[in-house]
Amino acid sequence: MKLLQNKTALITGASRGIGRGIAIEFAKQGANVAFTYNASAEAAKALEKELEAFGIKAIGYQSNAADFDAAQELAKNVLDEFGSIDILINNAGITKDNLLMRISEDDFDKVIEVNLKSVFNLTKAVIRPMMKQKAGSIINMSSVVGLKGNAGQANYAASKAGILGFTKSVALELGSRNIRCNAIAPGFIETEMTDKLDSKTVDEWRKGVPLRRGGTPKDIADACVFLASDMSSYITGQTLSVDGGMLT
């Protein structure tokens, strides 16, 4: 029996990177997958076909998670198409890094809106159907930066730290309805974005990790499978650091 057989997962920001890795592992574990993307319809169609090859149903939706009304409409469309939303992965996020002296108000607001408000928007959109089902798992993507801060990322750190407080509050509110809410704090994860960086810089980052390597999207996806499945049925309100020991 696959760990997520016959469950439906909604994953935001899944056309590339960590989100794409999560979608693939969920499909392997038998979950039907609804996912959102921002701009690349071509990449979304390709992912749909890749996921469907595992024998599950997959649909990509172009949707802005930072827009409250769009999130409500997305949840309704997913429910109409799939019949349930059993798992929500709040993965969509951006960075606009700069020293605090140089961060513009717009860059601060945009990061908070996309990274933190989107988590509120989507969680708000799915909790009513989850309450009717009397079951659900919500997984919010934070960051080690939300736990320790980072120079040049005050806006990003604030958004990711906010997710942790939100996660604990939702866990306390919805635990009695059998809805669990946890966060994952990834460390240095190697994706298409890090491929564009100088190799020496990436090597130095790897040396700073006790396991001496960067993480992969699959490392994060495996943690998500655990928190989404019944194997973690007594875990809620927690933050799981997937960082190769960075914060040890």
Image (spheres, rainbow, N blue to C red):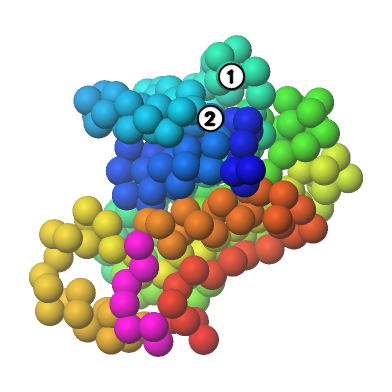
- What residue did someone put label 1 on? 82
Mark 1–mark 2 CB contact (< 8 Å): yes
**Sequence order check, earlier mark of 1 and 2:** 2
- What residue did someone put label 2 on? 32
Q: Which amino acid, by three-letter code, is at mark 1?
A: Phe
Residue nearest the observer in this picture, 52 or 123: 52
Left or right of 130? Residue 42 is left
Residue nearest the observer in this picture, 101 or 204: 204
In the image, residue 90 sits, relative to residue 154, either above or below, namely above
Numbered disc 2: secondary structure? strand
What residue is shown at x 70% (from left), y 55% (from top)?
Answer: 231
Numbered disc 1: secondary structure? helix
| Magenta stretch bounds | 210-216
Residue 127 location in percent, x, y? 71, 33
Residue 133 location in percent, x, y? 79, 28
Left or right of 107? Residue 180 is right
Label 1 environment density (alpha carbons within 10 Å; few <14, some 14–19, many ≥20): some
**Magenta-drawn stretch, dominant element (helix, strand or loop):** loop
